[in-house]
Image (spheres, rainbow, N blue to C red):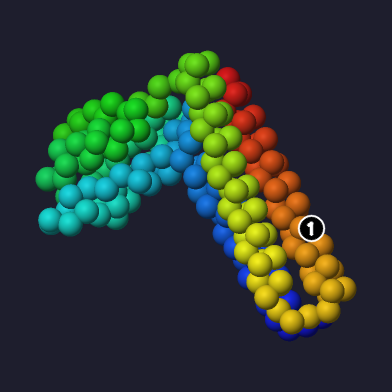
Amino acid sequence: MNEEVTFILDTTKESMEGSISHLEKALVKIRAGKASPVMLSTVMVEYYGSPTPLSQVSNINTPDARTISVQPWEKSLLQEIETAIMNANLGFNPMNNGEMVIINVPPLTEERRIQLVKQAKSEAEDAKVSIRNARQDANKELKKLEISEDLLSNAEVDVQELTDTFSKKVDAILTVKEGEIMKV
């Protein structure tokens, strides 16, 4: 096969893999009832005048399935951390005991579970759109090449197979996440 065609296929595959990894990162942030340090991955704390990820100024642990503990390396940050968690709008109510910030992760209601499934489906649909855009870009690039009709149609078939494969991966990932969310 033509080098340019191979390059376009490889680039397309990389782009689609990027869509899958983005989806996985987005789904990790959707909590399924169990406490996880990743839930606080988006929280930024004001540290010496610059916004810093919470994980870089404290230890984040989950002593049990319903609790997250955040122990800052500097006690003076307790109030800042508490405020940052509240401002992150994650639905958590942090408590400060003078040593660390403790967050009780409330059990999910049926209504909240349905909202989270909708959110997961939305993320999956975004990933599929991204995959389809990668397919469209690849087909445009292939049409620009000066290659035979046969080679062009074979390459387009390869691009479609990649698209189908990655769309199935998205569906599989979504199915697993839905199961996690709906499990009581």
Q: Amino acid at mark 1?
A: Glu
Question: From where the camera sits, is residue 17 visible?
Answer: no
Q: Residue at x 65, y 60 (%)?
A: 136
Q: Position of residue 33 (x, y in %)?
A: 49, 27
Residue that protrudes farthest toward the right in the picture:
150
- When asked about the image quadrant of residue 118, the answer is top right
Closer to the camera in the image, 147 or 72: 147
Question: From where the camera sits, is residue 71 visible?
Answer: yes
Q: Residue at x 68, y 75 (%)?
A: 144
Q: Position of residue 93 (x, y in %)?
A: 28, 26
Closer to the camera in the image, 118 or 24: 118
- When asked about the image quadrant of residue 103, the answer is top left
Q: Residues within 10 Å of mark 1 (few under 14, many from 20)?
A: few
In the image, is residue 110 above or below residue 15? above
- When asked about the image quadrant of residue 181, the answer is top right
Count of numbered marks: 1
Q: Position of residue 166 (x, y in %)?
A: 70, 53
Give the secondary structure at mark 1.
helix
Q: Quadrant of the C terminus?
A: top right
Relative placement, left or right, of 140 versus 31 is: right
Q: Residue at x 24, y 36 (%)?
A: 87
Residue that protrudes farthest toward the top in the picture:
110
Closer to the camera in the image, 146 or 17: 146
Relative placement, left or right, of 157 versus 41 is: right
Residue under pointer 1: 161
Closer to the camera in the image, 129 or 171: 129
Q: Residue at x 82, y 62 (%)?
A: 157
Q: Position of residue 170 (x, y in %)?
A: 66, 45
Q: Quadrant of the N terminus?
A: bottom right
